[in-house]
Amino acid sequence: MEKNKLLVFLFAMVPGMSHMYLGMLKKGVFLMSLFLAPIGLIFLTRGGFEIISCMLPIVWCYSFFDVFRYKGDTKEERYQTDTEFYQKLKSFCQEEAEPMFFKRRKLIGLFCIFLAIYTFVYNIIGYFTNWFGRIFWFCYVVLSKVPTLLVVIVLLKLGIDLLRSEDDNFVAYKKDNKKQKYYETELKNTIKEEAKPEEKQTAYDEEIKNDIEEIKVQQHDLQIQKEKINLEKGEKIVEPIFLEKRIEEQ
Protein backbone atom coordinates (compact mmCIF):
# COMPACT_ATOMS: atom_id res chain seq x y z
CA MET A 1 0.00 0.00 0.00
CA GLU A 2 1.47 3.34 -1.10
CA LYS A 3 1.54 6.11 1.48
CA ASN A 4 0.01 9.53 0.92
CA LYS A 5 2.66 11.76 -0.67
CA LEU A 6 1.24 14.92 0.90
CA LEU A 7 1.38 13.42 4.39
CA VAL A 8 4.93 12.21 3.74
CA PHE A 9 5.91 15.77 2.81
CA LEU A 10 4.17 17.34 5.81
CA PHE A 11 5.55 14.84 8.31
CA ALA A 12 9.04 15.32 6.81
CA MET A 13 9.03 18.83 8.29
CA VAL A 14 9.70 17.21 11.67
CA PRO A 15 12.84 15.03 11.60
CA GLY A 16 12.02 11.35 12.04
CA MET A 17 8.24 11.69 11.93
CA SER A 18 7.91 10.86 8.24
CA HIS A 19 10.12 7.79 8.72
CA MET A 20 7.74 6.63 11.44
CA TYR A 21 4.79 7.24 9.12
CA LEU A 22 6.42 4.95 6.55
CA GLY A 23 6.92 2.25 9.18
CA MET A 24 10.65 2.83 9.74
CA LEU A 25 10.30 3.31 13.48
CA LYS A 26 13.91 2.65 14.48
CA LYS A 27 15.40 5.20 12.11
CA GLY A 28 12.62 7.67 12.88
CA VAL A 29 13.20 7.50 16.63
CA PHE A 30 16.95 7.87 16.13
CA LEU A 31 16.63 10.97 13.92
CA MET A 32 14.04 12.58 16.19
CA SER A 33 16.24 11.97 19.25
CA LEU A 34 19.27 13.34 17.41
CA PHE A 35 17.31 16.49 16.61
CA LEU A 36 15.62 17.03 19.99
CA ALA A 37 18.58 16.20 22.27
CA PRO A 38 20.56 19.40 21.43
CA ILE A 39 17.39 21.48 21.82
CA GLY A 40 16.79 19.96 25.25
CA LEU A 41 20.39 20.65 26.28
CA ILE A 42 20.10 24.27 25.15
CA PHE A 43 16.89 24.77 27.13
CA LEU A 44 18.33 22.97 30.15
CA THR A 45 21.30 25.32 30.28
CA ARG A 46 19.15 28.34 29.32
CA GLY A 47 21.12 28.95 26.15
CA GLY A 48 24.51 28.18 27.63
CA PHE A 49 25.35 25.54 25.01
CA GLU A 50 23.71 27.28 22.09
CA ILE A 51 26.78 26.54 19.95
CA ILE A 52 25.56 22.96 19.43
CA SER A 53 22.50 24.37 17.65
CA CYS A 54 24.63 24.45 14.49
CA MET A 55 24.05 20.70 14.06
CA LEU A 56 20.25 21.09 13.96
CA PRO A 57 20.05 22.19 10.29
CA ILE A 58 22.26 19.25 9.30
CA VAL A 59 19.99 16.73 11.02
CA TRP A 60 16.85 18.38 9.63
CA CYS A 61 18.11 18.43 6.02
CA TYR A 62 19.31 14.83 6.18
CA SER A 63 16.00 13.64 7.61
CA PHE A 64 13.94 15.64 5.11
CA PHE A 65 15.71 14.42 1.97
CA ASP A 66 16.38 10.89 3.23
CA VAL A 67 12.71 9.99 3.66
CA PHE A 68 11.90 10.56 -0.03
CA ARG A 69 14.25 7.73 -0.96
CA TYR A 70 11.87 5.21 0.60
CA LYS A 71 8.41 6.51 -0.31
CA GLY A 72 8.32 4.32 -3.45
CA ASP A 73 9.50 1.14 -1.68
CA THR A 74 7.22 -1.62 -0.52
CA LYS A 75 6.45 -2.24 3.14
CA GLU A 76 8.78 -5.25 3.25
CA GLU A 77 11.65 -3.29 1.67
CA ARG A 78 11.25 -0.44 4.15
CA TYR A 79 11.15 -2.89 7.04
CA GLN A 80 14.33 -4.60 5.81
CA THR A 81 16.09 -1.23 5.36
CA ASP A 82 15.06 -0.17 8.86
CA THR A 83 16.31 -3.45 10.35
CA GLU A 84 19.66 -3.15 8.54
CA PHE A 85 20.04 0.42 9.80
CA TYR A 86 19.38 -0.73 13.37
CA GLN A 87 21.90 -3.57 13.08
CA LYS A 88 24.60 -1.22 11.73
CA LEU A 89 23.89 1.31 14.48
CA LYS A 90 24.02 -1.42 17.12
CA SER A 91 27.33 -2.82 15.83
CA PHE A 92 28.79 0.71 15.68
CA CYS A 93 27.80 1.36 19.30
CA GLN A 94 29.22 -1.96 20.51
CA GLU A 95 32.46 -2.02 18.50
CA GLU A 96 33.47 1.66 18.34
CA ALA A 97 31.36 3.97 20.50
CA GLU A 98 31.29 1.81 23.64
CA PRO A 99 35.11 1.23 23.77
CA MET A 100 35.69 4.94 23.13
CA PHE A 101 33.34 5.96 25.94
CA PHE A 102 34.91 3.37 28.23
CA LYS A 103 38.40 4.77 27.62
CA ARG A 104 37.20 8.34 28.17
CA ARG A 105 34.74 7.53 30.96
CA LYS A 106 36.49 9.80 33.48
CA LEU A 107 36.41 12.76 31.12
CA ILE A 108 32.76 12.13 30.27
CA GLY A 109 31.92 11.75 33.96
CA LEU A 110 33.60 15.06 34.78
CA PHE A 111 31.70 16.73 31.95
CA CYS A 112 28.38 15.38 33.26
CA ILE A 113 29.17 16.59 36.79
CA PHE A 114 30.17 20.01 35.44
CA LEU A 115 26.98 20.20 33.37
CA ALA A 116 24.83 19.32 36.39
CA ILE A 117 26.52 21.87 38.67
CA TYR A 118 26.52 24.54 35.97
CA THR A 119 22.83 24.06 35.19
CA PHE A 120 21.86 24.12 38.85
CA VAL A 121 23.90 27.21 39.77
CA TYR A 122 23.17 29.09 36.54
CA ASN A 123 19.42 28.66 36.82
CA ILE A 124 19.32 29.63 40.52
CA ILE A 125 21.48 32.73 40.06
CA GLY A 126 19.29 33.70 37.11
CA TYR A 127 16.29 33.96 39.41
CA PHE A 128 18.13 36.04 42.01
CA THR A 129 19.76 38.45 39.54
CA ASN A 130 16.99 41.02 39.63
CA TRP A 131 16.66 40.80 43.42
CA PHE A 132 20.21 41.34 44.65
CA GLY A 133 21.68 43.69 42.11
CA ARG A 134 25.05 43.80 40.46
CA ILE A 135 26.92 41.03 42.32
CA PHE A 136 24.55 38.34 41.14
CA TRP A 137 24.31 40.01 37.73
CA PHE A 138 28.11 39.79 37.39
CA CYS A 139 28.10 36.11 38.38
CA TYR A 140 25.27 35.51 35.93
CA VAL A 141 27.23 37.07 33.06
CA VAL A 142 30.39 35.12 33.94
CA LEU A 143 28.53 31.83 34.08
CA SER A 144 26.81 32.57 30.78
CA LYS A 145 30.25 32.65 29.10
CA VAL A 146 31.54 29.43 30.68
CA PRO A 147 30.12 27.10 27.98
CA THR A 148 31.74 29.18 25.23
CA LEU A 149 35.06 29.06 27.08
CA LEU A 150 34.69 25.31 27.55
CA VAL A 151 34.03 24.76 23.85
CA VAL A 152 37.07 26.89 22.94
CA ILE A 153 39.30 24.83 25.27
CA VAL A 154 38.00 21.54 23.83
CA LEU A 155 38.57 22.73 20.25
CA LEU A 156 42.09 23.92 21.07
CA LYS A 157 42.93 20.60 22.73
CA LEU A 158 41.52 18.68 19.77
CA GLY A 159 43.47 20.80 17.28
CA ILE A 160 46.75 20.37 19.18
CA ASP A 161 46.27 16.61 19.38
CA LEU A 162 45.55 16.38 15.65
CA LEU A 163 48.64 18.43 14.76
CA ARG A 164 50.93 16.19 16.78
CA SER A 165 52.91 13.65 14.80
CA GLU A 166 53.08 9.96 15.60
CA ASP A 167 56.58 10.33 17.06
CA ASP A 168 55.44 12.78 19.73
CA ASN A 169 55.01 11.67 23.30
CA PHE A 170 51.25 11.25 23.24
CA VAL A 171 51.02 8.68 26.00
CA ALA A 172 47.28 8.21 26.05
CA TYR A 173 47.21 6.92 22.49
CA LYS A 174 50.67 5.35 22.30
CA LYS A 175 49.95 2.87 25.06
CA ASP A 176 46.72 1.82 23.41
CA ASN A 177 48.45 1.49 20.02
CA LYS A 178 51.27 -0.62 21.50
CA LYS A 179 48.81 -2.93 23.23
CA GLN A 180 46.73 -3.22 20.08
CA LYS A 181 49.79 -3.99 17.93
CA TYR A 182 50.96 -6.60 20.46
CA TYR A 183 47.57 -8.31 20.50
CA GLU A 184 47.38 -8.20 16.69
CA THR A 185 50.83 -9.79 16.38
CA GLU A 186 49.94 -12.52 18.86
CA LEU A 187 46.68 -13.16 17.05
CA LYS A 188 48.46 -13.43 13.68
CA ASN A 189 51.01 -15.88 15.09
CA THR A 190 48.24 -17.99 16.59
CA ILE A 191 46.34 -18.02 13.31
CA LYS A 192 49.49 -19.00 11.40
CA GLU A 193 50.19 -21.86 13.81
CA GLU A 194 46.61 -23.12 13.60
CA ALA A 195 46.40 -22.66 9.83
CA LYS A 196 49.47 -24.82 9.02
CA PRO A 197 49.08 -28.23 10.68
CA GLU A 198 50.06 -30.04 7.46
CA GLU A 199 53.36 -28.14 7.22
CA LYS A 200 54.14 -29.01 10.84
CA GLN A 201 53.39 -32.68 10.18
CA THR A 202 55.54 -32.65 7.03
CA ALA A 203 58.48 -31.09 8.88
CA TYR A 204 58.10 -33.68 11.66
CA ASP A 205 58.08 -36.55 9.14
CA GLU A 206 61.20 -35.18 7.44
CA GLU A 207 63.02 -35.03 10.77
CA ILE A 208 62.13 -38.67 11.45
CA LYS A 209 63.33 -39.70 7.98
CA ASN A 210 66.62 -37.89 8.48
CA ASP A 211 67.12 -39.60 11.84
CA ILE A 212 66.42 -43.01 10.29
CA GLU A 213 68.88 -42.36 7.46
CA GLU A 214 71.56 -41.31 9.94
CA ILE A 215 70.99 -44.50 11.94
CA LYS A 216 71.27 -46.58 8.75
CA VAL A 217 74.52 -44.85 7.79
CA GLN A 218 75.92 -45.49 11.26
CA GLN A 219 74.91 -49.17 11.08
CA HIS A 220 76.49 -49.46 7.63
CA ASP A 221 79.74 -47.96 8.92
CA LEU A 222 79.76 -50.38 11.84
CA GLN A 223 79.17 -53.30 9.49
CA ILE A 224 82.09 -52.22 7.29
CA GLN A 225 84.35 -51.91 10.33
CA LYS A 226 83.35 -55.41 11.49
CA GLU A 227 84.08 -56.86 8.06
CA LYS A 228 87.50 -55.21 8.01
CA ILE A 229 88.30 -56.63 11.43
CA ASN A 230 87.18 -60.10 10.31
CA LEU A 231 89.26 -59.87 7.16
CA GLU A 232 92.34 -58.89 9.13
CA LYS A 233 91.84 -61.84 11.51
CA GLY A 234 91.33 -64.20 8.55
CA GLU A 235 94.55 -63.11 6.89
CA LYS A 236 96.51 -63.68 10.08
CA ILE A 237 95.12 -67.21 10.38
CA VAL A 238 95.50 -68.10 6.69
CA GLU A 239 99.14 -66.98 6.22
CA PRO A 240 100.81 -69.69 8.45
CA ILE A 241 98.85 -72.43 6.70
CA PHE A 242 100.07 -71.31 3.29
CA LEU A 243 103.65 -71.18 4.57
CA GLU A 244 103.50 -74.80 5.81
CA LYS A 245 102.14 -75.96 2.45
CA ARG A 246 104.93 -74.21 0.57
CA ILE A 247 107.58 -75.79 2.82
CA GLU A 248 106.15 -79.29 2.24
CA GLU A 249 106.09 -78.77 -1.53
CA GLN A 250 109.72 -77.71 -1.55
Image (cartoon, grey):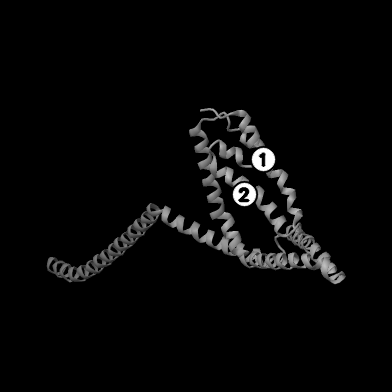
Q: Which residue is mark 2?
A: 33
In the image, residue 33 sits, relative to residue 233, either above or below, namely above
In the image, residue 27 sits, relative to residue 37, either above or below, namely above
Q: Nearer the viewer, residue 94 or 203?
A: 94
Residue displayed at 53% across by 55% down: 94
Q: Nearer the viewer, residue 110 or 168?
A: 110
The amino acid beneath tag 2 is Ser
Dot 2: what SS?
helix
Q: Which residue is mark 1?
A: 62
Q: What residue occupies the far front of the structure in this picture?
A: 131
Find residue 207 and report its image quarter: bottom left
For the residues bearing labels 1 and 2, Cβ distance under 8 angstroms = no
Residue 225 position, x and y percent, is 28, 67
Residue 62 position, x and y percent, is 67, 40
Per the rendering, the mark at residue 221 is none
Residue 3 position, x and y percent, is 56, 30
